[in-house]
Amino acid sequence: MSEQILTQPVFTTNSENTTKARTSLEKARIAHERYLIRQNNHDLNEAIEHYIDAVKLDPSIPESYYRLASLMFEQGQISVDTAIEQCKTACSLAPKNMNAHMYTGFFMKMAEDFKAAEEEFKSAIKMGKLKSARPRLILSQAILQRINSQNGNASDYMSFLYYFLSGSLMLAWDRPTMKMLYKNMSDDFSVFTYNTVGKFLEKFKMYPAAENVYKQAVTNTSHSDIFYDKMGDLALKNKELDMTVDCYRKVLESNPLNQEVLVKLATVLQTYFPENTDETIDCYERLLSFDNDKAQIYYELGHLYLRKEDKINSISAFKLALNETPDNPFYNNSLAYAYSKAELYEDAIEHYQKAIELNPDNEWTSIVCHALGSIYAENLDNMEAAVATFHAGIILDPKNYDLYIALGDLHMAEYDLDKAIKAYCDAITINPDDYRGYSKCGIALWEKDFLEEALVSYHKAIELNPENEFAHNNLGILYLDGLMDAEEALEYFETAIELNPNYTLAYFNAGRASQAMDFTNDAANYYQMAIDLNKITHELDEYDIQTRLRSLFEV
C-alpha cells in the first residue's frame, strides 16, 4: 500500500456499491475500535483494508477518508501532507462534518501549522456546539503545544485554559474519548513542566542541569522532537557541534517537516561541516517545499554546488534565485562567478555588469569590478576594458588595495613600468603593512634599472613576510646580477629552497651563485636538482641548465 491508494473521489457509484461501502465502513469501524483497545497490528491492517474498500465502492463517504488517513499515517504509509489532503477531501464532501474538520486540524497540528489547525478546530467547535468537547480539548492541546514550541503570551495561556475547561465540562456528552484525551493532556503538561524547568536553568546558565532535564523529557514524554531541538540549541551555544547536528537530525527523524530545524541544521552543516555538502543540499531542497524564501534557498544551493564543483547545477540554482528576485545584486554576482567557473565569460560579464549597475555598496561593488576586470584581462585579453573596470572600482573605493595591485599587474603585463610602479606605490600607501606591494614593486623597479630602490623594496617585503620564498629568490637575483655579490645572493637562494624544497628556479639560481664562487660540486648538485624538478614543473629551459652543468667540468 502507498500514498497512491488515496485519490480524489470520482463519483460513479450505484445503490448496490453504496450498500457494500457502508458494510465495509462498519467492518472498518469495528476493527478500528479493536485496534484502539488492543493495539494489535492485525486489527490495524484489517481496518485499513476495509476503509480502502469503502473508498473504492463509494468515494462520496467523508468518514472513510479521514479515518483511513489517520490509520495509514500512524502506520507510516503516508506523509502528514497526504493525510491533510485526504482530510480536506472529506471536508469538501461534507463541509459541515465536525470530525472531518477536527481530523484536518489534528494533522495540521502534526505539521506544526498551528494557525491553520486552530482555525479547523474552531470550525469543528461551531458545528458541534454542546458536543464539541473533543475539538475544544484538542484545540487546547494544540495551543499548549504551540506555547511549548514557541514563546506564548498571556492571551495564549487564557485561550488554553478556556478551551481546556470548556471542553472538560462538555465531556459529559463524549465519555468514550475522556480517557484518551486526558492521557494526551497529561503528556502535554509534562512537556510544559520540563520546558519551564529547562528554560529556568538555561537562564541562570546551568547548562549541564538543563541538558539533563531535556534528556529526561525525551524519555518521559512523547514529544522528544521538542527536547532534541532544545538540546541541539544548547549544544550549539556551548560549541558542541557534533552533538548539535545529532540532536537536529533526531528532530527531523520524528518530524521531517520541521522547517525551523531544517534551517538550523542546514546552517550548522554549511558553516561548520563543509565535508557534509550533500546533506546540507538535501536540507535546502526539503526547505523548498515550504514556499518560503525560495530565492535565498536557491542562492545557498548555488554556493553548495560550487563547493562540489558542480558548475551546471550551481548556475541553475543561481538562475532560479534570480527568477525570484531579478534585481538582487548579490545573486547576479554569484551567477556571474558560476558562469566564469564554467568559462562562459560573456554571460559572466553580463551579470557582473548588472551587479555593478545595482551597486548596493561602493566597497562591495569595487570587489565586483575587480572580478570583472580580471575576466577582461585574463580570459578575453581586453586590456583596455580591464584597465577601465579597475579604475571604476578604484573610484568606488579608493582604499581597495587589491585593485591597485591588480592594476599594477596589468601594467606590468603590458611592460608599462612607470604606471605599474605608480599603482604598486599607491597600494603601499594604502596598506604599508602588506608585503605584496613591496614585492611586486621590487620587480618593476628592477626592470626599470632602479637597483637600490628595488633592494629596499624587497628587503621590506621580506621583513613583513619572512616566509615568502619568492621574495628571497628575487632579492638573491638582485645581489647576484645587480651587485655581483654571489655570496650574499646564495644565502637568499638557500633560504628560498628551505621555504620551498620544490622551488626549481631557486635551485637554478643557487647553482649560478655557486658557479660564480667556483663551488663546482655545489653548483653541479643545484643544477641537477633543478633539472630533476623541471621535469615536473617545466619552469625553465632544460637545455640551458644542461649547458651550464656541462660547462662546470670543461677544461
Image (spheres, rainbow, N blue to C red):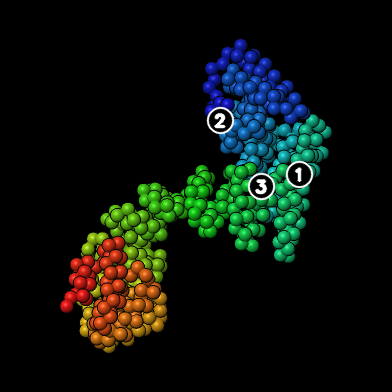
Which residue appears at 31% of the width and 81% of the height?
A: 490
In percent of width and height, residue 277 lies at 48, 51
Tag nearer the camera, 1 or 3: 3
- Give whichever of discs 1 and 3 has the lower sequence position: 1
Q: Amino acid at mark 1?
A: Asp
**Which mark is drawn over residue 297?**
none
Which residue appears at 29% of the width and 54% of the height?
A: 343
Can you identify the residue that label 3 sits on?
A: 225
In percent of width and height, residue 18 lies at 62, 15
**Which mark is drawn over residue 3?**
2
- Give whichever of discs 2 and 3 has the lower sequence position: 2
Residue furthest out toward the top: 16
* Local crowd size for mark 3, using a 10 Å CA cut-off: few (<14), some (14–19), many (≥20): many
Q: 454 or 429, which is in the foreground?
A: 454
- Vertical order, 364 against 161 (above or below): below
Q: Quadrant of the N terminus?
A: top right
Residue furthest out toward the left: 555
- Vertical order, 60 against 208 (above or below): above
Q: 345 or 502, which is in the foreground?
A: 502
Secondary element under disc 3, as helix, strand or loop, is: helix
Is residue 449 among the parts visible in the rendering?
yes
Secondary element under disc 1, as helix, strand or loop, is: helix
Is residue 92 among the parts visible in the rendering?
no
Which residue appears at 22% of the width and 63% of the height?
A: 381
- Vertical order, 120 against 347 (above or below): above
**Which mark is drawn over residue 187?**
1
Give the alpha-carbon distance from disc 2 to disc 1, as whole Å. Answer: 30 Å
Which residue appears at 76% of the width and 46% of the height?
A: 220
